[in-house]
Amino acid sequence: MIKPLFTKQSPMMVGIDIGSHSVKAVLLSKQQEQFHLEAFAIEPMAKGAISEREIQDIEAVGNVLNKIRKKIPRAVKFAAAAVSGSTVISKVIFMDVALTDAELESQIEVEADSLIPYPLNEVSLDFEKLDINESDPSKVNVLLSAARTESVESRVAALELGGFTGKVIDVESYALSRSAELCMAQLPDDAKQKVVAMVDIGATMTLLSIIEKGKTLYTRDQVFGGEQYTRSILSYYNKSYEEAELAKVSGDLPPNYTFEVLAPFQTMLLQQVRRGVQMYLTTSGKESVDYLIISGGTALLEGIDKLLTDELGIHTVIAKPFAGMTISSALDPELMASQGAQMMVATGLALRSFSPWHI
């Protein structure tokens, strides 16, 4: 029997992005077509509790989630979290269009044994029909995803320790894709028909999702993030890690830091984004990416959008997922506006409350 990795549409859930540097949570409600930001929380992650996107200390993560729990309405018990793409394998396979879901499941169990490079008793699988194959209408494209069961269960266990019930375990890059719909108003009117690259630059990992007409065409994770910027500040100015983090956020650095630390990091960031986009273009045969949406904590560095626009020739904006929402009176609208770029994955997870996305 296939162990579900992803589940169908669920009741109202808080989206919880469990990162190596912090835990971020977003709770949304919806009336008609209008989203409302009900609650929002960020808590620093205990050092060493997450390493290479895997939970190393479930109890420590649970303690951080307990702090998040106190900032979320008690009535909301369900949560959606995500595994990192580096621990997930997603493939589009082609199956007979006439197969029922039950028949697909049986067939996929057979196919998965040759497609997944882990023993099947160590992975959680899920699948979803996408659309009819353009080249062969007798086939349907089916998205097969697999994650190490250990990765899924550690997140579920941490959520339980934190006072939540894990209802959905998603994939970070697909959660990022889902939140794109909230940022389309920042782009020209034709964006919904164009190729849009989403780049989320976290502390240690950069997620790339390419979408077109609401469909995710390509995802990739790169080991690169704001941590490298912090460590440059740490070593260059002889600061502790905590001092370097504070200086990075507050901007309390010597005037020449722009040339000594910021410019080299911007060059590395530019190279990472360029490489990710180029790999997509090479594998897809597309000629270009039309728009770029940048998110994650590193997106808050001043001038990143202009740098990428100028150097890559791609119209770039910083994600503002809350811009078109109404906001709870308990929240500070200015803070929400400034922090929104960090919350794209959490927001994409929160959107699972309203949409039975294929992933």
Image (tube, rainbow, N blue to C red):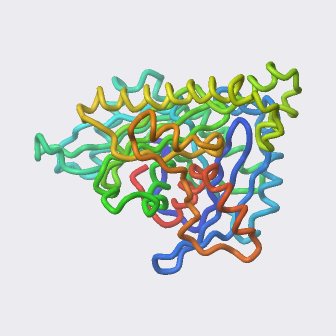
User: Going 51% across and 29% down the picture, which residue do you hit?
Assistant: 270
Q: Name the quadrant containing residue 261.
A: top right
Whether residue 165 is visible, yes or no, is: yes
Q: Name the quadrant containing residue 209.
A: top left
Q: Give the image location of residue 179, x and y in percent.
A: 50, 55
Using residue 45 as the reference point, say whether residue 226 is left or right of it.
Answer: left
User: Going 50% across and 31% down the picture, which residue do you hit?
Assistant: 221
User: Going 56% across and 58% down the picture, which residue do you hit?
Assistant: 320
Query: Is residue 187 placed above or below 231 in the rendered structure?
Result: below
Whether residue 60 is visible, yes or no, is: no
Q: Name the quadrant containing residue 284.
A: top left
Query: Is residue 340 placed above or below 273 in the rendered structure?
Result: below
Question: Number of numbered discs present?
Answer: 0
Residue furthest to the front in view is 255
Using residue 149 as the reference point, say whether residue 359 is left or right of it.
Answer: left
User: Residue 161 versus residue 300: which sits nearer the camera?
Assistant: 300
Query: Is residue 18 placed above or below 85 in the rendered structure?
Result: below
User: Going 19% across and 49% down the picture, which residue do you hit?
Assistant: 132
User: Residue 1 versus residue 86: which sits nearer the camera?
Assistant: 86
Q: Give the image location of residue 63, x and y in percent.
A: 83, 46
Q: Give the image location of residue 249, x and y in percent.
A: 77, 42
Q: Give the image location of residue 161, x and y in percent.
A: 78, 48
**Quarter of the picture holding the N terminus:** top left
User: Residue 166 versus residue 223: which sits nearer the camera?
Assistant: 223
